[in-house]
Image (cartoon, helix red, strand yellow):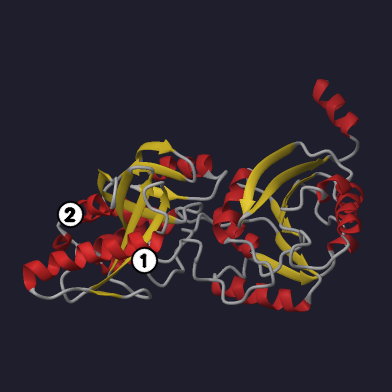
């Protein structure tokens, strides 16, 4: 199978797959391939935090023109997967000199499937773009065409808990990836000082409590497949839910917009996490650290893309607030404005290249010590 992800999260996804029990895990670009049985496919869709889709490859062949595309797709016995009364849709991604129009490829593929049924039964399955019984994924890389079945359906970032969003919400898979890259394991206090609609907080709580990422989803594509096994699915889900755990620290979010706070609280409630997360209508720049122990902070500040702010002043205030008011804190944030990082006035101890949508971004880490850095190193020497 193939798990698709965002650039920069491949290693985290490979680690997740290995921990879940996948076999022969191999990283690629924006994807990780692995082996597993049907139960593991259900498990991967339910539990993986950094996967966007789980694809099940069924055929690979060489493609040099539209004829070879058509015959290659016809060489699959499609009656194994659907019958003439069911529906399907074709999704195409390609990097090819042979074809330059993905819609043309999708149309040819549809013809190949439909013609096969017409010849055998005189009837044909129809196309349904919204709720197909089968989602066929075609990937053309130069002269190699791979056909896979999409077991997820809607992208796995659509967790099912987010009913309300803000102007620039962060994608759930990206939020989970950032948290895992930051080393968040649920063993300490957590804070998102600019929480927006609450996505980072919810993903952080789900990691802390080991709750399967997609437990709130309404459905997966594999539930419409001919070999759907409801009992097996329930068994897999029960075994994942038996591994959840309690979180015994403080998890808080701040946002200065009252509308964001209301949305965040709604989403937290939808995710059944209200007992773990507290959200306050506060401005981070007026706040200070209230707890004694170490604090893990992760946030997604505005980049100036969709929100009109004075970036220089804003990012300087981030640095000042961290420096003066948040000792003993590991602060991580992602920004798509690489210029703005210069105004923070602190030296990041880590920088990781990611993309937020199409925007090249950096995930940065600032370590705020309790007392000065020098004393910390002197203590370590003794």
Q: Is residue 258 above or below residue 67?
A: below
Give the side of residue 289 with respect to residue 119, left or right: right
Q: Nearer the viewer, residue 27 or 258?
A: 27
Q: Position of residue 137 (x, y in %)?
A: 34, 57
- The image shows residue 286, relative to residue 338, as above or below, that is below
Closer to the camera: disc 1 or disc 2?
Answer: 2
On screen, residue 114 versus residue 303, left or right, reads: left
Tag 1 residue: 220
Residue 186 seen in render: no
Residue under the point 33% across and 62% down: 106
Q: Position of residue 251 (x, y in %)?
A: 69, 60
Left or right, residue 7 beside residue 263: left
Assess disc 2: are there few (<14), some (14-19) or many (≥20) residues with their C-alpha within 10 Å of its C-alpha.
some
Q: Which residue is mark 2?
A: 76
If the image is split into quadrants, where does the C terminus sit?
top right
Q: Residue lying furthest top in this view?
A: 382
Report which quarter residue 351 is drawn in. top right
Residue 60 in sight: yes
Q: Which of pointers 1 and 2 lies earlier in the amino acid sequence? A: 2
- In the rendered image, residue 87, in percent from the top left (x then y), is placed at 25, 73
């Amino acid at each position: 199978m193939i798990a698709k992800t965002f650039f920069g999260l491949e290693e985290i996804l490979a680690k997740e797959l290995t921990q879940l029990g996948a076999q022969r895990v191999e990283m690629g670009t924006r994807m990780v391939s692995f082996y597993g049985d049907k139960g593991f496919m259900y498990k991967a869709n339910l539990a993986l935090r950094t996967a966007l889709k789980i694809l099940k490859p069924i055929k690979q062949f060489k493609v040099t023109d539209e004829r070879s595309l058509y015959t290659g797709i016809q060489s699959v016995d499609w009656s194994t997967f659907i019958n003439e009364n069911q529906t399907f849709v074709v999704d195409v991604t390609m990097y090819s000199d042979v074809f330059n129009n993905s819609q043309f490829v999708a149309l040819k593929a549809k013809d190949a499937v439909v013609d096969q049924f017409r010849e055998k039964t005189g009837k044909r399955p129809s196309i349904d773009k919204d709720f197909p019984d089968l989602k066929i994924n075609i990937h053309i890389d130069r002269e190699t065409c791979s056909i896979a079945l999409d077991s997820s359906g809607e992208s796995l970032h659509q967790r099912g808990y987010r009913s309300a969003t803000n102007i620039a919400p962060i994608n759930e898979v990206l939020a989970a990836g950032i948290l895992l890259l930051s080393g968040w394991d649920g063993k300490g206090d957590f804070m998102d000082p600019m929480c927006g609609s609450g996505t980072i907080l919810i993903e952080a709580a789900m990691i802390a409590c080991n709750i399967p990422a997609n437990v709130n989803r309404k459905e997966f594509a594999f539930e419409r497949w001919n070999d759907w096994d409801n009992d097996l699915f329930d068994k897999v889900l029960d075994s994942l839910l038996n591994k959840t755990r309690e979180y015994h620290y403080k998890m808080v979010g701040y946002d200065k917009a009252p509308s964001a706070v209301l949305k965040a609280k709604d989403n937290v409630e939808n995710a059944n996490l209200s007992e773990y997360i507290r959200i306050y209508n506060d401005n981070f720049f007026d706040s200070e650290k209230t707890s004694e122990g170490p604090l893990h902070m992760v946030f997604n500040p505005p980049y100036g893309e969709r929100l009109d702010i004075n970036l220089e002043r804003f990012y300087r205030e981030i640095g000042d607030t961290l420096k003066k008011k948040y000792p003993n804190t590991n602060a991580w944030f992602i920004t798509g404005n690489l210029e703005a990082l210069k105004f923070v006035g602190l030296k990041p101890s880590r920088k990781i290249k990611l993309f937020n949508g199409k925007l090249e971004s950096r995930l940065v880490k600032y370590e705020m010590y309790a007392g000065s850095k020098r004393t910390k190193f002197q203590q370590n020497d003794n």
